[in-house]
Amino acid sequence: MKPFDLARSLTERLLLPLMQGAEVRLVEPVGEARAVELGKALSGARLFDEVEELRLRAARRWVPVDELGDIAADEWLLVAALNDLLQLTNPALGRVRPRRTRARLAHLIERVIERAGPPRSVIAAVSRHALFSRVVELSRIDTQVSWWTGSDKFVGQAPPERLLHWPRLRKVRRRAEHVCLAQMADESAGEFAGLLDRWLAATPLTTLGTSQRSGVPFGWTGSALALTSTPGGRRVALRVLLSTADVPAALKELGHAAELLRPIDAGAFDHARAFVAEAEARRRQFAEQLGDLAAPRALGVRS
């Protein structure tokens, strides 16, 4: 498949539905060579107007920006890596030699993530977050079906209708389970958790206050520490954090993650703790302002 055809498939099946909160459908594993070729071929190419519009609209929730530029080569690498990372959870992957296939794909995913690296600027971090902020909302529906003579489990797909016929006679039972991102891989894909952590570290704004949805615990990665060490990055990170659904829970988690740094790196611990304290102070300030606006005013009545 040519780079532009691959980009179109990744956009239509993965990236665009992801940004819209719709159902994503994976393409076949991309691998390192094709991911690199994709990034080189599309760097500076403005091909998908709807993606550009959604990215800019999302970014404006956190920063006043009129232009983000074209989707960068490293962002295309992350799109390809995300597709392949999710393919690791596919039970049909490598039916002949599944363990060898998964190990090979995991190695290639790791190399692609390394090539993408952390965001090189605040605006690059914002752009990545605008593209991938809804990754943490990804979930899969697994369906367990049992009947009088057996049972079966359907991972990420609906069971065939023939298994559901005559439910009372055949004693058919159907149970659907929503599986969050962190729990999608079974034991045969042991590399998934570590690779997911590394992929998320490449878009540090996306990890702020999102573990309740993704199931991935927050960690003060090097990219998160670096981003919040600059004044601009710190401001954006605070805006993203304070716009999450459950700010107190997010702050508690960030504080817990900071404590894990205490015996490892005193400087990083102080930095993380100061960030959490500033975020808490701002949260209280916003709450007080909202309280003042909501408080009833005494109305003077002229006699």
Image: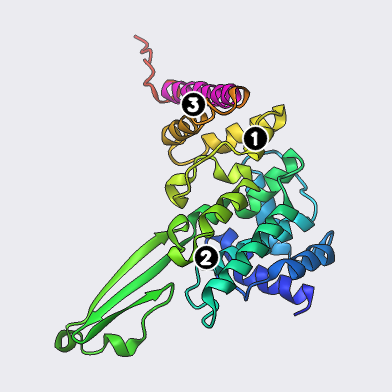
Quarter of the image for residue 172 reads bottom left
| 228 and 219: which is toward the camera | 219
Name the residue type under label 2: Ala
| 266 and 81: which is toward the camera | 266
Picture coordinates of residue 269, whole percent (x, y): 56, 25
Neighbours of disc 3 within 10 Å: few (<14), some (14-19), many (20+): some
**What residue sits 49% from the left and 24% below the top?**
280
Question: The N terminus lies in which quarter of the figure?
Answer: bottom right
Examine the rendered structure and indicate whether residue 12 appears above or below residue 259: below
Q: What is the spatial separation of the Cα atoms under label 2 and label 3, in whole angstroms? A: 31 Å
Q: What is the spatial separation of the Cα atoms under label 3 and label 1, in whole angstroms? A: 15 Å
Residue 138 in sight from this viewpoint: yes
Neighbours of disc 2 within 10 Å: few (<14), some (14-19), many (20+): few
Residue lying furthest top in this view?
303
Residue 3 in the magenta stretch? The answer is: no
| First to last magenta residue range | 269-291
**What residue sits 76% from the left and 45% below the top?**
66
Q: Which residue is mark 2?
A: 22
Examine the rendered structure and indicate whether residue 26 appears above or below residue 43: below
Q: Is residue 212 shown left or right of residue 196?
A: left
Picture coordinates of residue 46, whole percent (x, y): 80, 62
Residue 236 circle label: 1
Q: Is residue 127 shown left or right of residue 137?
A: right
Quarter of the image for residue 168 reads bottom left
Residue 25 in sight from this viewpoint: no
Residue 271 in the magenta stretch? The answer is: yes
Residue 283 circle label: 3
